[in-house]
Image (spheres, rainbow, N blue to C red):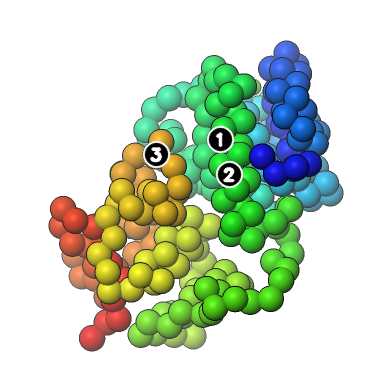
């Protein structure tokens, strides 16, 4: 765990909130809490926490709604705590911008493990605290813009252009596209994408399909008529320059 990482706990149940705060402070984290969604949005913009643990059953905002509002403000990693252990719900949350999830009831050990993973990914991607501003530091070669056909991916600015048009992608769609572009021409399996882009074994391969189809839609193509993103049936997907 990064020393003195800051975590915002959003939980309306006082007993659960207290126990989460105890676990997190016990691991040397700086913790603040909010019992509702709007209070959480305020803390995210003012305090700029390194990560957010978000309960989905809040009194003022529906979970997916809270997530979308957070994503409108910040790229801060969000770990959602859900009571519903079903695929459709979890895929919906990941699409709404969650970085990972925990199914209630969960142990302190699980919380710390997932949180450590999202903080590590966030540090590796240069999102940094609150991630409201531009990432600091000098560009390195791995951050050079990647160009394939009309597609231009700028890892530092985290922007994608198709010709003159900027393509608005979610954080995960961007990471997925950037990874495929770095490996352009190579077939990448879904399992490999889960390991390299999601960096965790808990996610269903179907999640990759959901993000791929979102990405295709935004790039204006279909799996049946691909331009950039080609599915190799039973093997994986590759990004190629359209001929
Ligand atoms: Ca609740």
Rendering quadrant holding ligand 1: top right
The x and y percentages for residue 140 are 59, 76
User: Regarding mark 3 in the picture, which secondary structure is present there?
Assistant: loop
Viewport quadrant of the N terminus: top right
In three-dimensional space, the C-alpha distance between marks 1 and 2, rounded to whole angstroms, equals 6 Å
Q: Is residue 194 above or below residue 232?
A: above
* Left or right, residue 207 beside residue 66: left
Q: Which residue is labeled 2 in the image?
A: 118
In three-dimensional space, the C-alpha distance between marks 2 and 3, rounded to whole angstroms, equals 13 Å
Evaluate if marks 1 and 2 touch, with contact meaning CB atoms under 8 Å apart.
yes
Name the residue at the right extreme: 46
User: Regarding mark 2 in the picture, which secondary structure is present there?
Assistant: helix
The x and y percentages for residue 221 are 30, 70
Q: Which label sits on residue 114?
A: 1
In three-dimensional space, the C-alpha distance between marks 1 and 3, rounded to whole angstroms, equals 11 Å
The picture quadrant where one finds residue 206 is top left
Q: Which of 181 and 59 is in front in this view?
A: 181
The x and y percentages for residue 154 are 54, 76
Mark 1 or mark 3: whose residue is earlier in sequence: 1
Near mark 3 (Cα within 10 A), the count class, few <14, some 14-19 or many ≥20, is few
The x and y percentages for residue 77 are 62, 46
Q: In this view, does 84 lie above or below 8?
A: above
* Left or right, residue 195 beside residue 226: right
Q: Is residue 122 above or below residue 164?
A: above
Near mark 1 (Cα within 10 A), the count class, few <14, some 14-19 or many ≥20, is some
The picture quadrant where one finds residue 141 is bottom right
Q: Which label sits on residue 201?
A: 3
């Amino acid at each position: 765990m990064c020393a003195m990482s800051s975590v915002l706990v959003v939980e309306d149940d006082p007993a659960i909130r207290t126990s989460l705060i105890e676990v997190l402070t016990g691991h040397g984290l700086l913790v603040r809490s909010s019992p509702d969604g709007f209070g959480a949005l305020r803390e995210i913009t003012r305090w700029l926490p390194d990560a957010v643990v978000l309960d989905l059953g809040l009194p003022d905002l529906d979970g997916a709604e809270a997530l979308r509002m957070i994503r409108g403000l910040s790229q801060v990693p969000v770990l959602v705590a859900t009571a519903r252990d079903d695929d459709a719900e979890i895929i919906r949350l990941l699409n709404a911008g969650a970085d990972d999830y925990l199914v209630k009831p969960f142990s302190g050990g699980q919380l710390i493990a997932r949180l450590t993973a999202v903080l590590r990914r966030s540090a590796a991607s240069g999102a940094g605290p609150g991630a409201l501003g531009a990432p600091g530091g000098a560009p390195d070669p791995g951050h050079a813009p990647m160009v394939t056909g009309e597609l231009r991916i700028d890892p530092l600015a985290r922007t994608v252009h198709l010709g003159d048009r900027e393509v608005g992608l979610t954080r995960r769609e961007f990471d997925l596209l950037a990874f495929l572009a770095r490996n352009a021409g190579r077939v990448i399996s879904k399992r490999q994408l889960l390991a390299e882009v999601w960096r965790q074994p808990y996610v269903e391969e179907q999640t990759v399909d959901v993000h791929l189809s979102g990405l295709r839609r935004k790039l204006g193509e279909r799996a049946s008529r691909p331009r950039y993103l080609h599915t190799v049936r039973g093997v994986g997907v590759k990004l190629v320059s359209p001929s």
